[in-house]
Image (cartoon, rainbow, N blue to C red):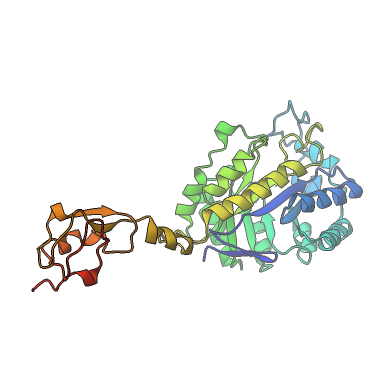
Amino acid sequence: MNQIKLGQRVIGPRSKPYVIAEIGVNHEGSMDQARRLIDLAKEGGADAAKFQSYKAGTLASRHSPSYWDTTKEPTRSQHELFSKYDSFGPDDYVALAGHCRQVGIDFLSTPFDDDAIEFLDPLVPFFKIASADLTNIPFLRKVAAKGKPVVLSTGACTLGEIDIAVETLVQSGTTDLALLHCILNYPTDNRNAHLRMIEGLKRAYPERPIGYSDHTLPDDSMTSLVTAHLLGASILEKHFTHDKTLPGNDHYHAMDVHDLARFVALAGRIHELLGPTDFKAPIATEALSRKNARRSIVLARDVAAGSPLTAADLTYKRPGTGVSPLHWDEVLGRRLHHTLQADHVLQWDDLAPSDS
């Protein structure tokens, strides 16, 4: 149950993370820049390049205040900010989806109105829903009616609100659903990332894949994404740009192609280190070590045939090719078939039956 098919990959708790490069509107209205960002997302190793599909007039009233760091993005009206970057229309997204197919990366775009749901439906392998629409019941129903997998961000939400959203989506047609932990601060200070909430989502929704949508400032080690993955996030989303020094919008808390490539390489190593199972057992490459590095019961001195073995007659040494010290108590009092010398690695066929 806690698996989901995203594009060509099936994602579960032991998968390499599905990485979404959130281009959003960092293309700033340029199709050439949008294509370049897709190319860079592919170069960095992302699974998907994601945009945002909205029109300012259907997204925010003219009186909607900002909720971001205005020292980084000085615009104080949501309507004003969104008006700067809402020039793309359905044909543009068709073209961008085609470019993604050409370079071999999943195309995604978050819809923010009913029209976007409709024109994106034939273009995307699954729908990503933003945190701010988690309580938008009619919108959730329209997305769910498309019958595609859904990845839902949960920023600024209570568990009760998430329960309602999950119930709405499932009752309206969604069968495959993943939840992303998210903090709705732009940017998110490290002290506010609260990555342990990933574990809380896993407990609350054990049947759902859990991921993380990150708004912290990237560091060289991509610590936030690495930590999230180690806590169980199997879907990772982060804003993506070609130039982190650009002012405004989402450039200032985005990763670039170098950050992305470092993380994807590191995630591959982490996946290799974690291994395929959590069931503790010896693995095949440990067979020689089990044989030669473990102890066997060894004679501490010469022992004559027929003599009952005492603790003073015995010690334990490598290799583990003889009787294991697990059977120490069974060996005490047993007699030898033959006289054996000190340092002999005891074998079961050295011992007479216990009742003789």
Residue drawn 33% across and 60% down?
320
Residue drawn 78% across and 35% down?
244
Left/right placement of residue 45 relative to residue 336 reads right
Left/right placement of residue 73 relative to residue 297 reads right
Residue drawn 47% across and 64% down?
284
Is residue 162 or residue 38 the one in the foreground? 38
For this orientation, the residue located farthest to the top is 71
Q: Quadrant of residue 85?
A: top right
Residue drawn 48% across and 53% down?
202
Residue 34 against residue 287 in the figure, above or below: above
Q: How far across and how far down the image is residue 311, in percent?
A: 14, 54
Q: How far across and how far down the image is residue 174, in percent?
A: 61, 66
Q: Quadrant of residue 310?
A: bottom left
Q: Quadrant of residue 209?
A: bottom right
Looking at the image, can residue 52 be seen?
no
Looking at the image, can residue 185 be seen?
yes
Q: How far across and how far down the image is residue 342, in percent?
A: 22, 56
Is residue 290 or residue 175 the one in the foreground? 290
Q: How far across and how far down the image is residue 140, in percent?
A: 64, 58
Picture quarter with the C terminus: bottom left
Left/right placement of residue 90 relative to residue 170 reads right
Is residue 215 or residue 62 the one in the foreground? 215
Left/right placement of residue 9 relative to residue 203 reads right
Is residue 188 or residue 165 the one in the foreground? 188
Residue 37 against residue 99 in the figure, above or below: above
